[in-house]
């Protein structure tokens, strides 16, 4: 048998085996799961203020789909029941749309009916009314009757593409290391390999972000800058001040039918796999050795701080930013110490961090400025002006590439109606030295931040070989110096001994430094620097045949990681019971005034999704759909101006038309949008539409052309287009000379 044919045949068999294993795993994980909600009745008390007394049986939030409902009920006489979607209203501006209704049978013990939701609702109410109050209810259940296999199909397609890529690449140099790194990333995602979703601190916020982007894309907005899934549809400018570029992938998959729960799980899986791949790519070049790069990658992935961020805190944006820290380190290293022509690595890393987590950008900027200050004088003295030129190239390209986000961000940054972020007393949330390196399972569950004992032990090994044995070459000494300097400072800044109170007492410190909220965010960088130090120490242990000590460090690291994962799995509550679980339209006050934020939920629920108008004004033909609102009005008393209140917060992104003519809009004391009908106008049409700011479009266009230019340059460099032109020009010059 031909060897080439044998290898191809073997490759096909491996792919088929991996795919079948994945298919079986997905089938076993997804089978038998049918989304169901249940509970006891909200109230057993009759609302006697109604002509026919009524009571609320249950309230819930549900996604689109088909459902069956069962209510345990005892009815001596007939009673009327109505299922109302209180999150929407009729065209007559009446709050509550009837989904289903009927009459109970006298003497029945249960109420059974089916219904279909064409729109997600955050407030679904079942109301029972009886003239003689003869109905008693106990418990209820709602079950989704849709097919649950959509997620399985999407996962199978993604798994097939993934395994096919790996099988095709298995003959590439260093493939075993790449595969090991990827499998470790997959293994660390096992807490989510179930039919439910375990609760993390900020999980609800990030799941809602995915759903909000999906809704925005479905309604024709790109990039998505306004979220109407949060805050009961009143609009939330989350995407302008909180980057979400990487959430577009799970959001697009949601448009193809993937559930919000599994979209979030997939996103976490991609974070772990990306951390493994980018970490290995970066560390193997920083440490100039494939094996050492693999060791450093393992250490970095297993740091307790990273895992607590990803699972217990569910701070997936910060965890995503941590993915690109090694690449940023590599880019800065090449820019100021190595091959400065690789300045594009810095651009890629900085761009990815910018679109992951803003607060991480602030900390990154601090470390980059420190490197610049330390290196600028030696660079000038050695006349390495090419490094300065490459640094300027990187800065310009970075700004142009990301102007579509930077321009809106700084345009809206500091607006009086924005809270931005909570500024806390940084000195009050600092771990002790013991907590920094030693933590038990309870500490991990209580979100105590720790680097783990392995990094402490490995750092001591590095210090021994560096300053007692003096066993490192010049390159490792240089790498170790910066890692020890910045890693040590990061650990010191996290502790109670750092003068956070003094820094925060200054205007600059209180406005900008305090925005990081928690000092232990510095541990993302401490993890990076200390993992490199520990790996350098392990390198010397290998060279001196101290394999048991090196193995012990790795085992300590694995133990800390397993403790974090086990604690999360055993103690975390279920957030979503199944793939079909609805995502509630939660209220967040980060980008409203403080006084509005305190009353946000009450405002949106009480006023509802409708126009508030005086009694003399009637509203008809009312429609509201994702950033667009229109209605007709009729005023019985046009002798005075009329103020109509719209269910949008008055960000500066809307355009209002009155009878086809553009007018300005105002806001009330709670920052809600108001439209003024002038004197003498008895009827007319009002239309409100999200249009953004014209300045945003400028940034979009510049970034688009920059992206196209970068792609064109990359392709031309890859395929030698410019080189061919240079060669042709040189040939023509030689011919001319002859």
Image (spheres, rainbow, N blue to C red):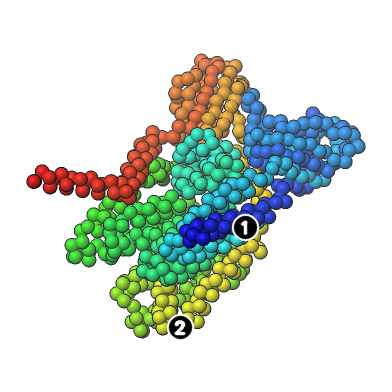
Q: In this view, does 327 lie above or below 626?
A: below
Check residue 419 in the rendering and tell me which mark sits there, or answer none.
none
Q: Is residue 515 above or below residue 543?
A: above
Q: Which of 401 and 699 is in front in this view?
A: 401
Q: Is residue 461 visible?
A: no
Position of 543 with respect to 62 (left or right) is: left
**Looking at the image, which residue is at 57% across and 23% down?**
631
Q: Nearer the viewer, residue 717 or 553?
A: 717
In this rendering, which labeled residue sits more in front, label 2 or label 1? 1
Position of 150 with respect to 392 (left or right) is: right
Most extreme residue toward the left is 738
The residue wearing badge 2 is: 546
**Looking at the image, which residue is at 43% across and 76% down?**
538
Q: How crowded is mark 1: few (under 14 residues within 10 Å), some or many (20 or more)?
A: few
The residue wearing badge 1 is: 21
Element type where label 1 sits in the image: helix
Residue 701 placement: quadrant: top left
Give percent across and percent down for residue 154.
Answer: 59, 46
Position of 717 with respect to 74 (left or right) is: left
Count of marks, rendered view? 2
Q: In this view, does 529 lie above or below 516?
A: below
């Amino acid at each position: 048998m031909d060897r080439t044919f044998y290898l191809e045949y073997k490759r096909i068999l491996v792919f088929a085996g991996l795919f079948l294993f994945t298919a079986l795993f997905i089938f076993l994980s997804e089978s038998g799961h049918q989304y169901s909600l249940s509970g006891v009745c909200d109230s057993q008390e009759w609302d006697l203020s109604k002509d026919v007394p009524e009571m609320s049986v249950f309230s819930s939030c549900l996604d689109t789909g088909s459902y069956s409902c069962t209510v345990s009920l005892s009815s001596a006489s007939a009673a009327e029941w109505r299922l109302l979607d209180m999150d929407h209203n009729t065209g007559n501006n009446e709050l509550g749309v009837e989904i289903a209704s009927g009459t109970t049978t006298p003497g029945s013990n249960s109420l059974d009916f089916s219904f279909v939701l064409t729109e997600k609702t955050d407030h679904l109410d079942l109301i029972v009314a009886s003239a003689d109050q003869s109905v008693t209810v106990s418990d209820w259940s709602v079950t989704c009757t849709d097919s649950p296999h959509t997620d399985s199909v999407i996962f199978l397609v993604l798994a097939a593409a993934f395994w096919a890529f790996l099988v095709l690449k298995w003959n590439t140099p260093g493939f075993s290391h790449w595969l090991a790194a990827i499998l470790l990333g997959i293994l660390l995602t096992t807490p989510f390999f179930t039919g439910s979703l375990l609760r993390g601190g900020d999980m609800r916020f990030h799941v809602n972000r995915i759903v909000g982007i999906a809704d925005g894309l479905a309604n024709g907005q790109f990039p998505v800058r306004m979220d109407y899934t949060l805050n009961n549809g009143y609009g939330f400018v989350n995407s302008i001040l909180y980057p979400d570029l990487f959430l577009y992938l799970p959001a697009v998959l949601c448009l193809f039918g993937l559930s919000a729960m599994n979209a979030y799980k997939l996103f976490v899986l991609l974070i772990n796999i990306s951390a493994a791949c980018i970490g290995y790519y970066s560390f193997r070049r920083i440490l100039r050795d494939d094996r050492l790069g693999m060791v450093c990658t393992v250490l970095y992935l297993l740091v307790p701080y990273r895992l607590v961020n990803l699972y217990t805190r569910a701070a997936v944006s910060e965890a995503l930013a941590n993915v690109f820290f090694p690449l940023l380190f590599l880019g800065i290293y090449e820019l100021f110490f190595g091959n400065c022509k690789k300045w594009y690595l810095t651009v890629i890393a900085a761009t990815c961090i910018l679109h992951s987590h803003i607060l991480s950008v602030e900390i990154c900027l601090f470390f980059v400025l420190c490197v610049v200050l330390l290196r600028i004088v030696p660079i000038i003295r050695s006349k390495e002006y090419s490094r300065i030129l490459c640094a300027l190239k990187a800065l310009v390209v970075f700004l142009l590439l990301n102007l579509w986000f930077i321009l809106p961000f700084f345009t809206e940054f500091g607006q009086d109606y924005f809270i931005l972020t909570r500024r806390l007393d940084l000195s009050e949330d600092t771990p002790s030295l013991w907590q920094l390196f030693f933590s038990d399972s309870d500490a991990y569950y209580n979100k105590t931040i720790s680097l783990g004992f392995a990094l402490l032990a490995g750092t001591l090994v590095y210090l021994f070989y560096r300053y007692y044995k003096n066993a490192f070459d010049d390159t490792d000494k240089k790498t170790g110096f910066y890692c020890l300097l910045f890693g040590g400072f990061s650990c010191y800044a996290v502790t109670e001994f750092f003068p956070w109170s003094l820094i925060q007492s200054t205007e600059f410190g209180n406005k900008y430094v305090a925005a990081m909220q928690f000092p232990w965010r510095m541990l993302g960088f401490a993890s990076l620097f200390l993992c490199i130090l520990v790996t350098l120490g392990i390198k010397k242990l290998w060279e001196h045949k101290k394999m048991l000590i090196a193995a012990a460090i790795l085992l300590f690291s694995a133990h800390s990681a397993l403790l974090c994962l086990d604690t999360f799995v055993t103690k975390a509550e279920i957030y979503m019971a199944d793939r079909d679980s609805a995502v509630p339209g939660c209220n967040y006050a980060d980008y409203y005034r403080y006084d509005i934020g305190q009353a946000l939920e009450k405002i949106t629920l009480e006023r509802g999704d409708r126009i508030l108008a005086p009694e003399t004004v009637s509203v008809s033909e009312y429609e509201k759909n994702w950033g667009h609102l229109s209605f007709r009005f009729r005023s019985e008393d046009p002798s005075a101006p009329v103020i109509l209140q719209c269910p949008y917060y008055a960000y500066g992104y809307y355009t209002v038309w009155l009878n086809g003519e553009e007018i300005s809009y105002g806001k009330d004391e709670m920052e809600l949008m108001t439209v003024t009908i002038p004197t003498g106008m008895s009827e007319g049409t009002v239309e409100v539409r999200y249009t953004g700011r014209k300045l945003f479009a400028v940034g979009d266009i510049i970034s688009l052309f920059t992206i196209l230019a970068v792609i064109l340059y990359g392709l031309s460099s890859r395929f030698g287009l410019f080189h061919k032109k240079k060669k042709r020009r040189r040939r023509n010059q030689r011919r001319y000379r002859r």
